[in-house]
Image (spheres, rainbow, N blue to C red):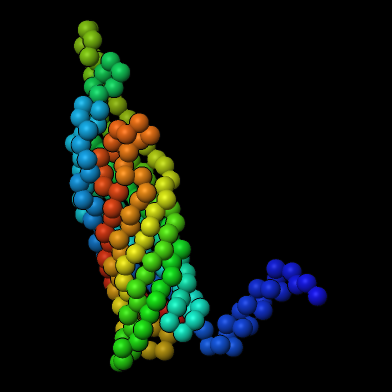
Amino acid sequence: MRCGPPLLAIAIVFVASAAGAQTSVGGIVGVSNQPTGDSDLPYLGRGFGGTAVGVIAAIDHDWKRHLAIGGEVSTAGAISGDQSQRASGASNAFVSHHRDTVFSATAKLGVGIGGGIRLAAVGGGGGAYRHTAREGTTSSLLPPASRAPFSETVSDFVFAYTFGADVSFDISKHIGILAVGRVHRLHDDDRLDNGVVARGVSSTIYRAGIGALWRF
């Protein structure tokens, strides 16, 4: 007999529960760092990077004894830099505010080392939403010279790889402390299709932090 999606979902949950599998939810606050990107003057420059407060939310489900599968959302506050850009018949000068939000499906290979401490290597893939807001002025390169306000938003969604490590410390059966480190590699190299630098921000992101873990 063929079973529909609701019955299949119930069967999966029943099997997982029978095997003693657990689901865990974690929230982490820490720091996010992006190195300075490339400069491509007069098209766009200078490159910029920086450090901001980072946040990671994760959910995992035990798949096998040492393997868990799940998903993560990783984001941070905006980083900023002064930039200029040569446009058709004009020169733009502005401040760029940039933020990357990464969505990842993950696999975690973990091992307990005693005392309620567990280590896990993390790998995964997904996508990153890149958002850059530019505010400044634009100046005409041809007479009569003029200056006007300039505003532009550059946003896109690119493929991203994620890897890193987790360390968890059990406080009780259901609650623990979770420390994480992540490297996100965005698959765009910060370049437009014609090879020109798109933002001047690195496509590699480093994030680390500490937070809480709840198992149920």
Please, is residue 139 above or below residue 66 in the view? above
Residue 33 position within the rendered picture, expressed as x and y whole percent measured from the top left? 23, 56
Res 58 quadrant in image: bottom left
- Percent x, y of residue 135: 28, 33
Residue 59 visible, this angle: no
State whether residue 128 appears in this view.
Answer: yes
Given residues 113 and 208, the one toward you in this image is: 113
Q: Residue furthest bottom?
A: 115
Q: Nearer the viewer, residue 131 or 45?
A: 45
Q: Quadrant of the N terminus?
A: bottom right
Closer-to-camera residue (116/19): 19
Residue at image position (30%, 92%) is: 115
Asked if residue 122 is positioned above or below residue 201 in the image, the reply reads: below
Residue at 78 percent of width and 72 percent of height: 2
- Name the quadrant containing residue 141: top left
Residue projecting furthest to the right: 1
Of residues 135 and 32, the one drawn nearer to the viewer in this rendering: 32
Q: Is residue 81 above or below residue 61?
A: above
